[in-house]
Every structure is written in C-alpha cells, then in structure tokens.
Amino acid sequence: MCSWDIAHVKQFFSFRSQDCLYPCAMVQWYSRCGDEPDEDTGIWIVEPDVCKDSMPFTDIIHLDIIVCSSHLIAVYGNRPLLKGILLCYTLNLFHSYYINKYIDHYAFEIAF
C-alpha cells in the first residue's frame, strides 16, 4: 500500500462545464494506522480521517483516479457485536478497519 490511499465513496455525481462532462465522487478519506501492516495478520489497518472539529474529512475526486474497490473488515475488538446491525451502517460504527488483501488476486497484489 505504499502510495495507495483508501476512501469511502459517499456519492457519485457529475457536472458539466464548458461542454465537458466531469464524472466525480464525494469520498471520505482513511489513513493507515502505523507504518507497517498489523503484526498478527499481516494486513493493513486504516481509520477514517477527521478534521479538527471531529467531522469526517471529505473531498471531491474525479472518477479517473479510482483504481479499484477495497474490502474493509471492521476491527471488532473482544466484545460481541450487537444483534441487528445492518451492513449499510458498518463503515460508520467502527473506529478502524482491516483492508482485506485476501479477497482476490488483484487486491493481494496491490495491498501486499
């Protein structure tokens, strides 16, 4: 993951300016926890970036800079999860996430 950045796409949209269409995404950025992968799993851990006022750090990016999707697994800790947690809320419930490099060959090559 040397120079790769992780972001959560919140919304896709496009706009037109001077007869040129710009496909974009609003993303929330994530940062790596530490300079090396997790010692036990060999997998990188990321956490959401926040501004000084504790709001998520978001940005607008062009779709051309998105390389591939990432599979994030929540770092659960040692307590059991509550029943009824919907999958659509999991990226908002946890403080850090593993980047699953074992999801497919392409992810393994990128996230080494």
Image (spheres, rainbow, N blue to C red):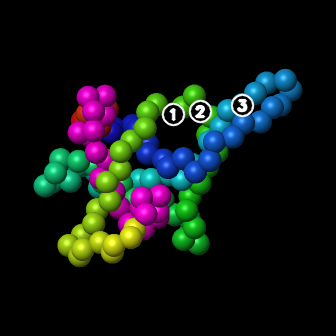
Residue at the image point whose x is 33% and y is 75% from the top: 82
Q: Secondary structure at mark 2?
A: helix
The answer to whether residue 48 is seen in the rendering is no
- Answer with left or right where residue 79 lies relative to residue 85: left
Q: Residue furthest top?
A: 19
Where residue 46 sits: x, y (%)? 36, 54
Residue 73 seen anywhere in this rendered image of the structure: yes
The answer to whether 59 is drawn above or below residue 91 in the figure is above
Q: Quick check: marks 1 and 2 in contact, CB under 8 Å?
A: yes
Q: What number is the disc on residue 9?
A: none
Task: Give the labeled residue for mark 2.
Answer: 63
Q: Secondary structure at mark 1?
A: loop
Mark 2 crowdedness (10 Å alpha carbons): few <14, some 14-19, many ≥20: some
Is 96 a magenta residue? yes
If the image is split into quadrants, where does the N terminus sit? top left
The residue where tag 1 is placed is 66
**Residue depicted at 41% across the width and 53% down the height:** 31
Q: Residue 73 at what x, y percent from top left?
A: 31, 54
User: Which is nearer the N-term, disc 1 or disc 3?
Assistant: 3
